[in-house]
Amino acid sequence: MVPFSFETARREQDAIRAGAAGGRYIAGGTTLIDLMREEVERPEHLVDINALPLAGIRADGADLVIGALARMSEVAAHPDTQRLQPLIAETLIEGASPQLRNVASIGGNLMQRVRCPYFRMLDAACGKRDPGRGCAAIGGINGNHAILGTSDSCVATHPSDLAVALVALDATMRVRGPQGERTFPVEELYRLPGDTPHLEHTLLPGELIVDLRVPGGPYARRARYLKVRDRASYEFALVSTAAALDIDGGVIRDVRLAAGGVGTRPWRMRASEQALKGQAPTRENFAAAAQLSVDGAKPLSGNGYKLDLLPRTMARVLAMAGEVA
Amino acid sequence: MSSHSQTDQASRGETDAATGLSRRDVLHIAGGAASLAALSGGVADAAAPPAHAAITTMPVRLTINGKERHLDVDPRQSLLDLLREKLDLTGTKKGCNQGACGACTILLDGKRVNSCLTLAVMHDGASITTIEGLAGGRDLHPLQAAFIEHDGFQCGYCTSGQILSGVGCIREGHAGSAEEIKFWMSGNICRCGAYPGIVAAIADAASRS
């Protein structure tokens, strides 16, 4: 690990000042410390933000508000999460291990880096690590990589399960920084890699995630997450899909769909949503809409199976959410 | 060698009757001899690394197995390395050192965590329980006893992590069935494959708690 200086921020303005000056925020640290040990990450200054009062979880009417420093396990177990947004609890429990969930923060979960093995391998080409150096995964072992949103510079998937649920549910995030406070959809946090894969998010220097707001809705309680992976637990998704349905009088009034393990960012599936609105919640309709999810997908040498696995996963999670026999 | 002065009685474990030396002491002595040999060869000067920014150690106060410690730590030091290298609490094991295997599981303020993936400097004021602090005097913790009764280990390398994680699993209320235990213990890998015994031990201890 490359030496760094360390400070504990006791006040939010101290954290933001240090962050704006180039300091790196650390909360749980479960991704950052691992990558620092590999020397993929080499921050010169770490700012420990755990003392800031940003760990609350609360209901605001039908909305769920989650502090950026709340831990994954706390959010998953919180009665307001389970009552208002069971999908959030389900995606959290499907991610990482109990030990990691006790430490990893919600803000850090959204900001975690990719799990592409070439990103970790300092002697492999990786444009995310060394801009302009190309991508070893494109001609390498890429069975776990993305089929949507890829470029010649990067094909890594975004690893967060939680982010899939947040994007599906139109969650927003509040951030504060040197220029003040702003709120925007979680979906807009993530950039496509294009030819600048090292630029992963839209936060400005020094901006600190304050909290997330997950809006309530009729569909929030009929929502499920299905994660397909190489082992039954404690593994990243090959393909995952979150589905939330509002069914009334035998008709789908509203639907939210997003997928993980397939895109370079958490991927909202709007074409499939549109196809389902006003339709009956039948297996045939679910399968037809799910097939639209792979329109425009670009498989690599090792991940063509995702062209079948994504629509099948989506059709199945829609059936789970709709409780279709 | 300064770490010797901070050695816990609890961590000494088995001591050879003839020499009075534990396995850990022997390793320390052997390591010291090896570095002296390297120095006498004159290699050390030639191989001196380029100067880095000076490392400033930072004070941290921790309560470890009930005993308060005032320590100066390198900010880079993980809780795992602090326990093993500085405090000689080698019951906590280093497996993958990247949060994938669970061998380094400890209780941090009562919650199970991977000690390899957190920096000691971040935990000023925290309370830590390691495998050395689980038993009450000469009485094993009920889960330690259950691991013996149900044959929950073979080589033993993952065992202290399994037991600390199992304590957390039971406390969290996630030990209601074999299926539930398997899911909530998935952060602990056993390459010997002692899983049936591990699950049985946790189920048994949970039913008695």
Image: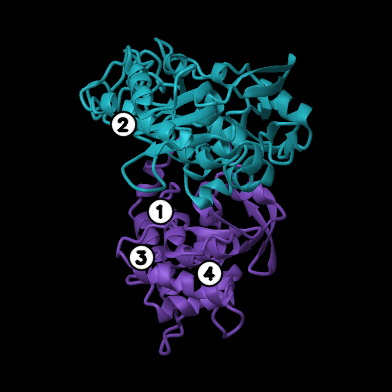
Chain colours: A cyan, B purple
Which amino acid does the dot numbered 2 rest on? Asn
Q: CA distance from mark 2 to mark 1?
A: 21 Å
Q: Residue at x 45, y 48 (%)?
A: B99
Q: Residue at label 2?
A: A144
C-alpha span from label 2 to label 4: 37 Å
Q: Secondary structure at mark 4?
A: helix
Chain under numbered label 2? A
Q: Circle 4: is it few (<14), some (14-19), or many (20+) Cα within 10 Å?
A: many
| Outermost residue toward the front in this view | A249
What chain does mark 3 sit on? B
Residues at circles 3 and 4 in contact by the CB criterion of under 8 Å: no
Label 2 environment density (alpha carbons within 10 Å; few <14, some 14–19, many ≥20): many
Q: Secondary structure at mark 1?
A: loop
Q: Please, what secondary structure does the residue beneath circle 2 have?
A: loop
Q: Are marks 1 and 3 in contact (CB under 8 Å)?
A: no
- Return the residue nearer the eye: B202 or A6: B202
Relative to A46, does residue B173 appear above or below in the rendering? below
Q: Chain of mark 4?
A: B
Q: Which mark is residue B131?
A: 4
Residue A256 shows up from this direction: yes
Location of mark 3 (residue): B195
Identify which amino acid the numbered label 1 is placed on: Cys
Q: Quadrant of residue A210?
A: top right
Density class for disc 1 (Cα within 10 Å; few <14, some 14-19, many ≥20) is many
